[in-house]
Image (spheres, rainbow, N blue to C red):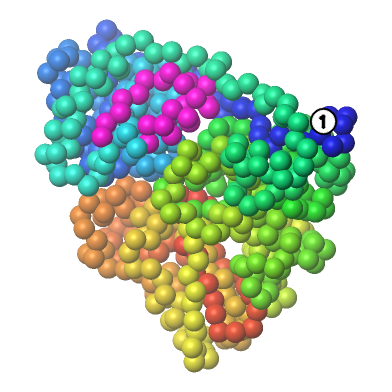
Amino acid sequence: MSGSPQEILVPTADQGVSVKAHKVARTGNGTQRVIGLLNNSKPNVNYFLEAIDAELASRFPDYKIVNFVKPRSAGPCLELDDIAEQCDFAINAVADCGSCTAWSVHDSIELEKRGVATIIVVTDVFEELSKEVAGSMGAANIRMATIAHPLGELKEHEVKARAKKNANRIIATLMAPANTDRSNLSAPAGPLPPLGSAEAVNDYFYAKRWTDGLPIVPPTAELISRFLATVATPADTIVGIIPPMMGRATVEKIAVNAAMAGCRPEYLPVVIAAVKAICHPDFNLLPIQATTNPVTPLIIVNGPIVEQLQLNSGYNVLGQGWRSNATIGRTLRLVLVNIGGGVPGRMDKACQGQPGKFSMCIAENAKASPWEPLHVEKGFAPDQNTVSVFGVTGTQDIVHYARTNAEEVLRTVIHSAPREGYKNLYSGGGPLIIFGPEQASILGKANLSKKDVKRIVFEGSKIPIDIFNAETVTLMKGRRQKYFAEMKDVREVAIADSAGDIEILVAGGAGNHSVFLPSWGDTRCVTVPI
């Protein structure tokens, strides 16, 4: 860090390498060349690849064509080693949304590193995103073919016509050499120009897209040194790698963003823990940063630190009014933007977004809960300080008018659950339910445990599968394979993969309200110690 106390520090980070791979020896092919077709399970991709398969068969009759299906478009591809073992070439299709584009680029790079010549097929709306993600991973010149958007809304014959129209270019690009040199990472940020006032700092940072649109506190070297004094960890320690730009989130860079957000220095350990939590593989941050969905991390703080930092767990817990809640949540967003590159419209492709993307940080109202707190449920001691992160797509108020017994309280929750257009139905996972203290007390007095409540909500909110069209059911079966396998003859679909995937906590003030928060589905709650 600079010796000049008033020097303004840069909030962005150097890029890191995200992927780890190994060479896989191919077996059993002899001299025959093999082309793998990787279907990422997006709507209509099966028709698209059927047409590509036919084109390949007619042009390369001596080649073998092998089809692979990736059930979760917004998650890791478990088929990579199989593809690498069997195939010389691969066509990875079709990236037509933010989250699937991010993972498709990742998968294609992994296959290239395993020695498989790979092309990613992406729709034009997400071409820029795919190039940004590829560049951030050191593979700016990976093979890529762009087709018109959209694909999922077309009829079968239209999809196949589009595939046939683009087949020449896709095949030619696939067979051509590609430059996947990983040395083209961006250079470290240089010094800032002279910025003589807080207004000038704000104007410069805003123009660089280093803010959330609101004014920031100039991150001077002197201010950052006060933040770093609150933790024993060296400033250059990497807490995590933030996708999709794969920025190195060092303690110092996190502190810079915390200062900008208006945090007090003593908040830094909570922020560091939150960054560590979102970098856990179970949280699945890569597609969250790029998805068209409005998902954002909700930070939940537990332990004695709640009172120490005056974190709000009562009235207006999801709203404004508390510096610690507001600035800790805001810091995490700035980290995602400045270190991870999640700039709206560029990497962050959320169609509408949500207000929680400014800041979303709460504490659990453990004193008002009849149950064990969330962190205890996750295996931590009651006096441990923890941060949990949960990828939520919004909040839905539940009003419990004249609901004075446990059965009525839970019936209202069940009837408030979305019936369609709800990500957990399609991708699994489970929602978060925040009970107000009054409703939690009613449930507790009825001797209902958290496990009981989860089971009742899980069973009661099932939806008849025949309300969905055939294409949606096929998508659900692909993304929720374990659920459909375990349930066998599925006639109803639950709002979570299991009762245990529904998360419950108590927060808020007195009144007849609870909150239903759908999750993004392809993410899981992660809890870490502070």
On the question of residue 370 being in view, the answer is no
Q: Which residues are magenta?
A: 126-148
Note whether 310 is above or below 296 in the view shown. below
Query: Looking at the image, which is closer to me, 241 or 68?
Result: 241
Q: Nearer the viewer, residue 39 or 325?
A: 325
Q: Position of residue 97 (x, y in %)?
A: 37, 42
Is residue 132 on the magenta stretch?
yes
Instruction: Say few, some or many: other residues with alpha carbon within 10 Å of mark 1 (under 14 / 14 to 19 / 20 or more).
Output: few
Tell me where residue 522 appears, x and y as whole percent.
Answer: 45, 49
| Residue drawn at (12%, 18%) of the image | 58
**Which quadrant holds residue 298?**
bottom right
Q: Is residue 333 above or below residue 161?
A: below
Which element type, helix, strand or loop, lies under badge 1?
A: loop
Report the side of 323 relative to 167 (left or right).
right
Q: Residue at left 32%, top 64%? A: 420
Quadrant, the N terminus? top right
Q: Amino acid at mark 1?
A: Met
**Closest to the observer, 382 or 136:** 136
- Image: 217 above or below 410: above
Would residue 145 be seen by someone viewing this image from the given angle? yes
Q: Is residue 251 magenta?
A: no
> Of all residues shown, which one is farthest toward the top?
31
Horizontal arrangement in the rendering, residue 364 relative to residue 7 (left or right): left
- Is 328 positioned to the left or the right of 23 in the image? right
Residue 24 position within the rendered picture, expressed as x and y whole percent measured from the top left: 44, 18
Q: Residue at x 60, y 84 (%)?
A: 511
- Front-most of 466 and 141? 141
- Residue 69 place in picture, x, y as percent: 31, 36
Q: Which residue is mark 1?
A: 1
